[in-house]
Image (cartoon, grey):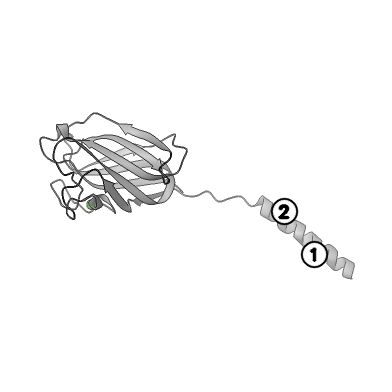
């Protein structure tokens, strides 16, 4: 009887190992997230129009000068925001919500969370985008590392002497 029990126990261990080995990992679903915090090259105000106004979900409706969006200190020249995300992801898309004088985004660069690896995912010449508000939807391919930071650079040379403002920056990818 004892031998039978030992044999039975050994069989169960083998079965358990086999079951574990056969179980496949479950693929992670893509997720989208809004920036948790923002650094900036400059900001128009410390509260309204500050860098943090580009964190979180969009909260500007329509097109116009709105304190719930980030604006740089000056309505001329270049400026950038660095959007930081809580969960680093292999990116598939970055969406930039432009709510005043769209068309100024000239460069989007992504970093890993440790700020070691980086890749430029978008470049363009500044233009006056007639559609406003406008979402710049960038499809991201070929970034092999998990992204934790997105830098959005704007050039306001075609913004008609007024500010180009960004309401939110969405990062889509797989954790
Ligand atoms: Ca906002």
Q: Is residue 94 left or right of residue 99?
A: right
Q: Where is residue 64 drawn, in percent x and y? A: 13, 46
Q: Where is residue 96 drawn, in percent x and y? A: 28, 43
Q: Residues within 10 Å of mark 2 (few under 14, many from 20)?
A: few
Taking the view exactly as shown, the residue that stands out farthest to the top is 125
Q: Is residue 104 left or right of residue 7?
A: left
Taking the view exactly as shown, the residue that stands out farthest to the left is 161
Q: Is residue 160 left or right of residue 17?
A: left
Vertical order, 129 against 54 (above or below): above
Give the residue drawn at x 32%, y 51%. Answer: 35
Give the residue drawn at x 18%, y 38%. Answer: 131
Q: Where is residue 58 drawn, in percent x and y? A: 25, 52
Q: Which mark is residue 9?
A: 1
Q: Where is residue 164 drawn, in percent x and y? A: 17, 41
Vertical order, 35 against 163 (above or below): below
Q: Element at badge 1?
A: helix
Q: Is residue 3 left or right of residue 9?
A: right
Give the residue drawn at x 31%, y 37%. Answer: 108
Give the spatial CA distance, label 1 vs label 2.
14 Å
Read off the residue under disc 2.
Answer: 18
Return the residue nearer the eye: 3 or 83: 83
Return the residue nearer the eye: 132 or 72: 72
Vertical order, 154 against 10 (above or below): above
């Amino acid at each position: 009887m004892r031998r039978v029990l030992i044999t039975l126990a050994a069989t169960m261990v083998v079965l358990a190992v086999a079951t574990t080995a056969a179980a496949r990992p479950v693929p992670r679903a893509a997720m989208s997230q809004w920036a948790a915090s923002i650094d900036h090259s400059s900001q128009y105000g410390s509260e309204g129009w500050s860098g943090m106004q580009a964190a979180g979900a969009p909260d500007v409706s329509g097109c116009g000068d709105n304190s719930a969006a980030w604006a740089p200190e000056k309505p001329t020249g270049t400026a950038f925001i660095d959007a930081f995300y809580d969960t680093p992801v292999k990116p598939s898309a970055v969406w930039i919500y432009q709510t005043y004088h769209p068309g100024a985004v000239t460069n989007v660069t992504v970093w890993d969370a440790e700020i070691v690896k980086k890749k430029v995912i978008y470049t363009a010449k500044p233009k006056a985008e007639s559609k406003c508000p406008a979402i710049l939807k960038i499809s991201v391919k070929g970034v092999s590392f998990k992204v934790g930071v997105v830098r959005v650079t704007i050039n306001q040379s075609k913004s008609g002497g007024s500010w180009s403002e960004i309401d939110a920056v969405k990062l889509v990818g797989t954790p």
